[in-house]
Image (cartoon, helix red, strand yellow):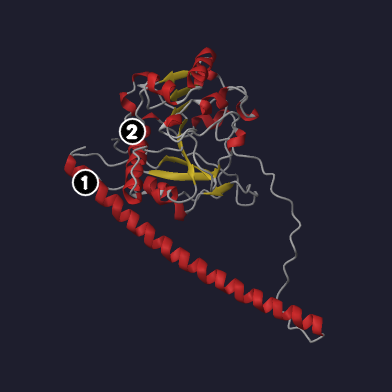
Amino acid sequence: MAKGGKQHLKSALQSQQSRLKAKQKLSQAAQALQQKAKRNNSKGGAQQNVASRSGLPQVKGKGKEKATSTAQPSTAKSTVPFKPTDKILLVGEGNFSFARALVIDSPPEITHMPPGNITATTYDSEEDCYSKYTDAQEIVEGLRDKGVKVLFGVDGTRLDRAAGIKGKKFNRIVFNFPHAGKGISDQDRNILSNQMLILGFLSSASRFLVPGPIPVAFQSRKRKRSDDEEESGDNDGGSENEDAVDLSGSSSALSRGTVLITLRNVAPYTQWDVPRLAKNPPPPQTASAPRYSRYTLLRSFKFHRSLWRGYEHKMTKGERAHGTGKTGEGGEDRTWEFYLSDVNSDKR
Protein backbone atom coordinates (compact mmCIF):
# COMPACT_ATOMS: atom_id res chain seq x y z
CA MET A 1 0.00 0.00 0.00
CA ALA A 2 1.33 3.44 -0.91
CA LYS A 3 2.38 5.70 1.95
CA GLY A 4 -0.44 8.17 1.26
CA GLY A 5 -3.04 5.40 1.13
CA LYS A 6 -1.78 3.91 4.37
CA GLN A 7 -2.03 7.30 6.07
CA HIS A 8 -5.64 7.69 4.88
CA LEU A 9 -6.42 4.23 6.26
CA LYS A 10 -4.95 5.16 9.63
CA SER A 11 -7.02 8.35 9.68
CA ALA A 12 -10.19 6.38 8.94
CA LEU A 13 -9.46 3.89 11.70
CA GLN A 14 -8.62 6.68 14.17
CA SER A 15 -11.99 8.29 13.42
CA GLN A 16 -13.62 4.95 14.11
CA GLN A 17 -11.72 4.74 17.42
CA SER A 18 -13.00 8.19 18.41
CA ARG A 19 -16.60 7.19 17.67
CA LEU A 20 -16.20 3.99 19.67
CA LYS A 21 -14.74 5.87 22.65
CA ALA A 22 -17.65 8.33 22.61
CA LYS A 23 -20.09 5.42 22.50
CA GLN A 24 -18.32 3.74 25.43
CA LYS A 25 -18.49 6.95 27.49
CA LEU A 26 -22.24 7.14 26.95
CA SER A 27 -22.57 3.48 27.92
CA GLN A 28 -20.51 4.03 31.09
CA ALA A 29 -22.65 7.04 32.02
CA ALA A 30 -25.81 4.97 31.57
CA GLN A 31 -24.36 2.18 33.73
CA ALA A 32 -23.47 4.70 36.43
CA LEU A 33 -27.07 5.95 36.48
CA GLN A 34 -28.37 2.38 36.72
CA GLN A 35 -26.04 1.61 39.64
CA LYS A 36 -27.17 4.77 41.40
CA ALA A 37 -30.80 3.76 40.94
CA LYS A 38 -30.04 0.30 42.35
CA ARG A 39 -28.38 1.83 45.42
CA ASN A 40 -31.45 4.02 45.99
CA ASN A 41 -33.70 0.98 45.66
CA SER A 42 -31.53 -0.90 48.13
CA LYS A 43 -31.92 1.91 50.65
CA GLY A 44 -35.68 1.75 50.17
CA GLY A 45 -35.58 -1.99 50.79
CA ALA A 46 -33.63 -1.49 54.00
CA GLN A 47 -36.23 1.01 55.22
CA GLN A 48 -38.99 -1.54 54.55
CA ASN A 49 -37.08 -4.12 56.61
CA VAL A 50 -36.92 -1.65 59.51
CA ALA A 51 -40.65 -1.07 59.19
CA SER A 52 -41.27 -4.80 59.26
CA ARG A 53 -39.26 -5.32 62.44
CA SER A 54 -41.04 -2.37 64.12
CA GLY A 55 -44.49 -3.67 63.24
CA LEU A 56 -45.31 -0.70 61.01
CA PRO A 57 -47.31 -1.30 57.83
CA GLN A 58 -45.29 -1.95 54.67
CA VAL A 59 -46.02 -0.55 51.24
CA LYS A 60 -45.98 -3.33 48.66
CA GLY A 61 -44.92 -2.58 45.11
CA LYS A 62 -47.06 -3.44 42.14
CA GLY A 63 -46.56 -6.57 40.10
CA LYS A 64 -45.14 -9.94 40.91
CA GLU A 65 -42.20 -10.20 43.23
CA LYS A 66 -39.12 -11.84 41.85
CA ALA A 67 -38.45 -15.20 43.43
CA THR A 68 -35.03 -15.79 44.87
CA SER A 69 -33.06 -17.73 42.28
CA THR A 70 -31.99 -21.19 43.35
CA ALA A 71 -30.91 -22.24 39.86
CA GLN A 72 -27.62 -24.02 39.55
CA PRO A 73 -24.84 -22.59 37.37
CA SER A 74 -25.36 -23.26 33.68
CA THR A 75 -23.90 -26.51 32.39
CA ALA A 76 -24.68 -25.64 28.78
CA LYS A 77 -22.71 -27.47 26.16
CA SER A 78 -19.71 -25.58 24.81
CA THR A 79 -19.81 -24.54 21.17
CA VAL A 80 -17.69 -26.56 18.74
CA PRO A 81 -17.77 -24.58 15.47
CA PHE A 82 -16.38 -27.41 13.34
CA LYS A 83 -17.67 -30.57 11.69
CA PRO A 84 -15.71 -33.72 10.77
CA THR A 85 -15.97 -32.87 7.08
CA ASP A 86 -14.60 -29.31 7.38
CA LYS A 87 -11.42 -28.18 5.69
CA ILE A 88 -9.78 -25.94 8.29
CA LEU A 89 -7.04 -23.33 7.93
CA LEU A 90 -5.38 -22.16 11.16
CA VAL A 91 -3.63 -18.79 10.93
CA GLY A 92 -1.13 -17.36 13.40
CA GLU A 93 -0.48 -20.52 15.41
CA GLY A 94 2.06 -20.11 18.21
CA ASN A 95 3.31 -23.49 19.41
CA PHE A 96 0.65 -25.31 17.33
CA SER A 97 -1.13 -26.53 20.45
CA PHE A 98 -4.56 -25.61 19.03
CA ALA A 99 -3.87 -27.69 15.93
CA ARG A 100 -2.88 -30.53 18.24
CA ALA A 101 -6.14 -30.13 20.18
CA LEU A 102 -8.09 -30.52 16.94
CA VAL A 103 -6.32 -33.77 16.11
CA ILE A 104 -5.39 -35.43 19.41
CA ASP A 105 -8.00 -35.88 22.15
CA SER A 106 -10.43 -33.66 20.25
CA PRO A 107 -14.07 -32.99 21.26
CA PRO A 108 -16.48 -35.83 20.36
CA GLU A 109 -18.11 -33.74 17.62
CA ILE A 110 -14.95 -33.88 15.48
CA THR A 111 -13.34 -37.12 16.63
CA HIS A 112 -13.55 -38.53 13.10
CA MET A 113 -12.12 -35.50 11.32
CA PRO A 114 -9.25 -36.60 9.03
CA PRO A 115 -6.01 -34.87 10.12
CA GLY A 116 -5.37 -34.12 6.46
CA ASN A 117 -8.30 -31.69 6.56
CA ILE A 118 -6.26 -29.33 8.74
CA THR A 119 -3.64 -26.84 7.53
CA ALA A 120 -1.84 -25.10 10.40
CA THR A 121 0.29 -22.03 9.72
CA THR A 122 2.45 -19.60 11.64
CA TYR A 123 4.06 -16.27 10.79
CA ASP A 124 7.40 -17.38 12.21
CA SER A 125 10.06 -19.28 10.34
CA GLU A 126 10.55 -22.84 11.53
CA GLU A 127 13.77 -21.89 13.29
CA ASP A 128 12.22 -18.88 15.05
CA CYS A 129 9.16 -20.88 16.06
CA TYR A 130 11.22 -23.57 17.77
CA SER A 131 13.34 -20.88 19.42
CA LYS A 132 10.28 -19.03 20.77
CA TYR A 133 8.33 -22.07 21.95
CA THR A 134 10.32 -24.93 23.43
CA ASP A 135 7.59 -27.53 22.89
CA ALA A 136 6.74 -26.52 19.33
CA GLN A 137 9.09 -28.92 17.53
CA GLU A 138 7.70 -31.96 19.33
CA ILE A 139 4.13 -30.83 18.61
CA VAL A 140 4.87 -30.18 14.93
CA GLU A 141 6.50 -33.57 14.50
CA GLY A 142 3.43 -35.22 16.03
CA LEU A 143 1.09 -33.27 13.77
CA ARG A 144 3.03 -34.14 10.63
CA ASP A 145 3.10 -37.81 11.62
CA LYS A 146 -0.71 -37.66 11.79
CA GLY A 147 -0.97 -36.06 8.34
CA VAL A 148 -1.59 -32.40 9.26
CA LYS A 149 -0.05 -29.89 6.84
CA VAL A 150 2.18 -27.48 8.80
CA LEU A 151 3.46 -24.32 7.11
CA PHE A 152 5.93 -21.73 8.41
CA GLY A 153 6.49 -18.14 7.32
CA VAL A 154 2.84 -17.52 6.42
CA ASP A 155 1.63 -13.91 6.73
CA GLY A 156 -2.06 -13.93 7.64
CA THR A 157 -2.55 -10.67 5.71
CA ARG A 158 -0.89 -12.12 2.59
CA LEU A 159 -2.23 -15.66 2.41
CA ASP A 160 -2.07 -15.60 -1.39
CA ARG A 161 1.74 -15.66 -1.11
CA ALA A 162 1.73 -18.99 0.75
CA ALA A 163 2.56 -21.63 -1.85
CA GLY A 164 1.16 -24.42 0.33
CA ILE A 165 -2.43 -23.14 0.16
CA LYS A 166 -2.65 -21.59 -3.30
CA GLY A 167 -5.80 -22.65 -5.12
CA LYS A 168 -7.33 -24.20 -1.99
CA LYS A 169 -10.66 -23.37 -0.33
CA PHE A 170 -11.58 -23.83 3.31
CA ASN A 171 -14.81 -24.18 5.28
CA ARG A 172 -13.28 -22.53 8.35
CA ILE A 173 -10.38 -20.08 8.63
CA VAL A 174 -9.37 -19.55 12.25
CA PHE A 175 -7.26 -16.80 13.83
CA ASN A 176 -7.06 -17.28 17.60
CA PHE A 177 -5.96 -14.26 19.64
CA PRO A 178 -4.44 -12.23 16.80
CA HIS A 179 -1.91 -9.59 17.78
CA ALA A 180 0.49 -7.50 15.74
CA GLY A 181 3.13 -7.96 18.46
CA LYS A 182 4.83 -4.64 17.77
CA GLY A 183 5.25 -3.72 21.41
CA ILE A 184 3.76 -0.25 20.98
CA SER A 185 3.27 1.39 24.38
CA ASP A 186 0.83 4.06 23.18
CA GLN A 187 -2.58 2.42 23.43
CA ASP A 188 -4.21 4.28 20.52
CA ARG A 189 -1.35 3.40 18.17
CA ASN A 190 -1.41 -0.17 19.45
CA ILE A 191 -5.15 -0.45 18.73
CA LEU A 192 -4.60 1.00 15.26
CA SER A 193 -1.82 -1.48 14.52
CA ASN A 194 -4.03 -4.41 15.44
CA GLN A 195 -7.02 -3.07 13.50
CA MET A 196 -4.85 -2.96 10.40
CA LEU A 197 -3.83 -6.56 11.08
CA ILE A 198 -7.49 -7.63 11.34
CA LEU A 199 -8.43 -5.75 8.16
CA GLY A 200 -5.57 -7.32 6.24
CA PHE A 201 -6.44 -10.79 7.49
CA LEU A 202 -10.14 -10.51 6.64
CA SER A 203 -9.44 -9.34 3.10
CA SER A 204 -6.75 -11.96 2.58
CA ALA A 205 -8.92 -14.78 3.94
CA SER A 206 -11.84 -13.88 1.65
CA ARG A 207 -10.09 -15.52 -1.32
CA PHE A 208 -9.81 -18.86 0.43
CA LEU A 209 -13.35 -19.36 1.74
CA VAL A 210 -15.61 -22.00 0.22
CA PRO A 211 -18.43 -20.28 -1.75
CA GLY A 212 -22.04 -21.27 -1.28
CA PRO A 213 -25.35 -20.34 0.35
CA ILE A 214 -25.35 -18.13 3.44
CA PRO A 215 -24.64 -20.28 6.52
CA VAL A 216 -27.00 -20.28 9.48
CA ALA A 217 -26.28 -20.90 13.13
CA PHE A 218 -29.47 -21.27 15.15
CA GLN A 219 -32.68 -23.20 14.94
CA SER A 220 -35.43 -20.73 15.76
CA ARG A 221 -36.21 -18.08 18.34
CA LYS A 222 -38.30 -20.67 20.20
CA ARG A 223 -35.26 -22.82 20.78
CA LYS A 224 -33.47 -21.85 23.97
CA ARG A 225 -29.89 -20.99 23.16
CA SER A 226 -27.11 -21.71 25.59
CA ASP A 227 -25.62 -18.94 27.70
CA ASP A 228 -22.47 -19.28 25.62
CA GLU A 229 -24.15 -18.23 22.39
CA GLU A 230 -25.27 -14.82 21.19
CA GLU A 231 -27.38 -14.52 18.08
CA SER A 232 -26.13 -12.02 15.57
CA GLY A 233 -27.80 -8.61 15.68
CA ASP A 234 -27.69 -5.13 14.26
CA ASN A 235 -25.38 -3.82 16.96
CA ASP A 236 -22.71 -6.30 15.93
CA GLY A 237 -23.36 -6.11 12.24
CA GLY A 238 -25.03 -9.50 12.09
CA SER A 239 -27.82 -10.89 10.01
CA GLU A 240 -31.32 -11.44 11.32
CA ASN A 241 -31.71 -15.16 10.64
CA GLU A 242 -34.11 -15.70 13.54
CA ASP A 243 -35.74 -18.70 11.86
CA ALA A 244 -32.50 -20.23 10.65
CA VAL A 245 -31.76 -23.87 11.31
CA ASP A 246 -28.55 -25.32 12.63
CA LEU A 247 -27.03 -27.07 9.65
CA SER A 248 -25.48 -30.44 10.44
CA GLY A 249 -24.44 -33.40 8.41
CA SER A 250 -23.52 -33.40 4.72
CA SER A 251 -25.76 -30.48 3.71
CA SER A 252 -23.74 -28.04 5.83
CA ALA A 253 -20.67 -28.70 3.73
CA LEU A 254 -22.40 -26.80 0.90
CA SER A 255 -22.75 -23.55 2.89
CA ARG A 256 -20.45 -20.57 2.60
CA GLY A 257 -17.16 -20.77 4.50
CA THR A 258 -16.65 -18.73 7.66
CA VAL A 259 -13.86 -16.86 9.43
CA LEU A 260 -13.48 -17.23 13.20
CA ILE A 261 -11.59 -14.66 15.30
CA THR A 262 -11.10 -15.21 19.03
CA LEU A 263 -10.13 -12.44 21.44
CA ARG A 264 -10.45 -11.47 25.08
CA ASN A 265 -13.76 -9.67 25.46
CA VAL A 266 -12.25 -6.87 27.55
CA ALA A 267 -10.38 -3.63 26.87
CA PRO A 268 -8.22 -2.94 24.98
CA TYR A 269 -9.32 -5.79 22.67
CA THR A 270 -12.92 -4.61 22.61
CA GLN A 271 -11.61 -1.27 21.32
CA TRP A 272 -10.42 -3.01 18.17
CA ASP A 273 -14.15 -3.15 17.37
CA VAL A 274 -13.74 -6.30 15.27
CA PRO A 275 -17.45 -6.91 14.42
CA ARG A 276 -17.91 -3.40 13.06
CA LEU A 277 -14.53 -3.48 11.33
CA ALA A 278 -15.65 -6.62 9.49
CA LYS A 279 -19.07 -5.20 8.59
CA ASN A 280 -18.04 -1.65 7.68
CA PRO A 281 -14.35 -1.53 6.73
CA PRO A 282 -12.83 1.80 5.61
CA PRO A 283 -13.31 2.71 1.93
CA PRO A 284 -10.49 2.15 -0.62
CA GLN A 285 -7.63 4.53 0.02
CA THR A 286 -6.77 5.06 -3.66
CA ALA A 287 -8.88 5.16 -6.80
CA SER A 288 -7.29 1.99 -8.17
CA ALA A 289 -7.44 -0.04 -4.94
CA PRO A 290 -10.19 -2.66 -4.56
CA ARG A 291 -12.47 -2.25 -1.60
CA TYR A 292 -12.03 -4.26 1.57
CA SER A 293 -14.12 -7.41 1.85
CA ARG A 294 -17.32 -7.00 3.85
CA TYR A 295 -18.50 -9.64 6.28
CA THR A 296 -21.65 -10.39 8.23
CA LEU A 297 -21.54 -11.64 11.81
CA LEU A 298 -23.04 -15.13 11.98
CA ARG A 299 -22.73 -15.55 15.76
CA SER A 300 -20.44 -15.13 18.73
CA PHE A 301 -19.85 -17.55 21.58
CA LYS A 302 -17.61 -18.13 24.57
CA PHE A 303 -14.33 -19.80 23.78
CA HIS A 304 -13.65 -22.41 26.46
CA ARG A 305 -9.97 -23.24 26.52
CA SER A 306 -10.71 -26.34 28.59
CA LEU A 307 -12.62 -27.76 25.61
CA TRP A 308 -9.40 -27.87 23.61
CA ARG A 309 -7.20 -30.13 25.68
CA GLY A 310 -3.56 -29.17 25.77
CA TYR A 311 -4.17 -25.81 24.11
CA GLU A 312 -2.05 -22.92 25.37
CA HIS A 313 -2.42 -19.32 24.28
CA LYS A 314 1.11 -18.10 23.71
CA MET A 315 2.23 -14.51 23.34
CA THR A 316 3.43 -13.36 19.91
CA LYS A 317 6.89 -12.71 21.32
CA GLY A 318 7.08 -16.23 22.71
CA GLU A 319 8.57 -17.56 25.91
CA ARG A 320 11.49 -15.18 25.67
CA ALA A 321 9.15 -12.38 26.79
CA HIS A 322 8.66 -12.28 30.58
CA GLY A 323 9.53 -15.92 31.04
CA THR A 324 6.29 -17.79 30.34
CA GLY A 325 4.92 -16.40 27.07
CA LYS A 326 1.35 -16.60 28.39
CA THR A 327 -1.17 -13.79 28.59
CA GLY A 328 -2.46 -12.32 31.83
CA GLU A 329 -5.77 -13.17 33.40
CA GLY A 330 -9.02 -11.25 33.17
CA GLY A 331 -12.13 -11.21 31.05
CA GLU A 332 -13.71 -13.96 28.99
CA ASP A 333 -12.45 -15.38 25.74
CA ARG A 334 -14.94 -14.96 22.90
CA THR A 335 -15.12 -16.10 19.27
CA TRP A 336 -16.79 -14.09 16.52
CA GLU A 337 -17.76 -16.03 13.40
CA PHE A 338 -18.26 -14.19 10.09
CA TYR A 339 -19.20 -15.01 6.52
CA LEU A 340 -18.65 -12.94 3.39
CA SER A 341 -21.56 -10.59 2.74
CA ASP A 342 -20.96 -10.62 -1.01
CA VAL A 343 -19.02 -13.54 -2.49
CA ASN A 344 -18.81 -11.73 -5.83
CA SER A 345 -17.18 -8.60 -4.43
CA ASP A 346 -13.70 -7.55 -5.52
CA LYS A 347 -10.94 -8.96 -3.41
CA ARG A 348 -7.79 -7.25 -2.30
Residue occupying the point 37% across, 62% down: 22
Q: Which residue is mark 1?
A: 7
Vertical order, 330 against 82 (above or below):
below
Where is residue 113 shown, x and y percent of the image?
57, 22
Q: Amino acid at mark 1?
A: Gln
Label 2: which secondary element: loop
Q: Which residue is mark 2?
A: 157
Residue reaching furthest to the front:
323
Q: Nearer the viewer, residue 29 or 228?
A: 29
Where is residue 322 shown, x and y percent of the image?
45, 36
Residue occupying the point 26% across, 48% down: 10
Q: Quadrant of the C terminus?
A: top left
Residue 155 showing in the rendered view: yes
Mark 1–mark 2 Cα distance, whole angstroms, equals 18 Å
Counting residues from the N terminus, which is met first, the one under dot 1 or under dot 2? 1
Where is residue 338 shown, x and y percent of the image?
45, 41
How packed mark 2 is, by other alpha carbons closer than 10 Å (few <14, some 14-19, many 20 or more), is: some
Q: Nearer the viewer, residue 23 or 47?
A: 47
Q: Amino acid at mark 2?
A: Thr
- How many discs mark residues in the rendered view? 2
Residue 167 showing in the rendered view: no
Where is residue 307 shown, x and y percent of the image?
61, 34
Residue occupying the point 69% across, 48% down: 74
Vertical order, 222 against 208 (above or below):
below
